[in-house]
Amino acid sequence: MFFSPFAAKAGLFKQLRSPDRQRALTGIRNAAWDVTYLSDLSRRAMTEPYETKRFLLATADRALAEIAPLLFIDAEDMAGFETALAARVEPWWRGDAAAVARFATDAMAEAESRPPPEGPEGVDDYVGYLMGLGEQKILGG
């Protein structure tokens, strides 16, 4: 069973516009943790045998609870995924749900068709490097 550690008191990106940039950075880190958490949940749920394991997400974070089902859309191909995604985002996007789903699936197809990005010469941990740059920007450095 996956329990979200904290209840949300704000949107998915908490404190993003705070004048205290350290608080903004803390909110961004929290959102990154949420994405990591959901990614791990979906990885485990999709690789474990259904007959022996079940996974539940228990959270008071409404945004996390609303996003989680999107990770479990089961479709044979990208067209089926796009249709299912449009149906699931309809409550948020109303008449634009199909366009939002198309945008998302186009971005996924593009990401899958290109090689992973490479960091600058001498950078071994590119993700960590990018995180550092982002944190500097948030903190005004």
Image (spheres, grey):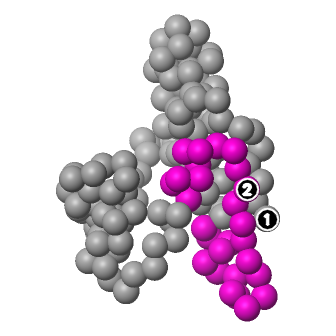
Residue drawn 51% across the image and 23% down it: 16
**What residue did someone put label 1 on?**
1
* Label 2 residue SS: strand
- Read off the magenta span: 42-68
Tell whether position 103 is magenta: no
Regarding residue 124, the answer to whether it shows in the image is no
| Circle 2: residue type | Ala
**What residue did someone put label 2 on?**
58
Spot occupied by residue 121 in the image (x, y as percentages of width and height):
44, 43
What is the spatial separation of the Cα atoms under label 1 and label 2, in whole angstroms?
7 Å
Q: Identify whether 4 is placed above or below 140.
A: below
Identify the residue at the far bottom of this view. Answer: 51
Residue drawn 39% across the image and 63% down it: 88
Residue drawn 31% across the image and 63% down it: 86
Tell whether position 43 is magenta: yes
**Side of 92 where 30 appears, left or right:** right
- The foreground one among 33 and 81 is 81
- Asked if labels 2 and 1 touch by Cβ distance under 8 angstroms, the answer is yes
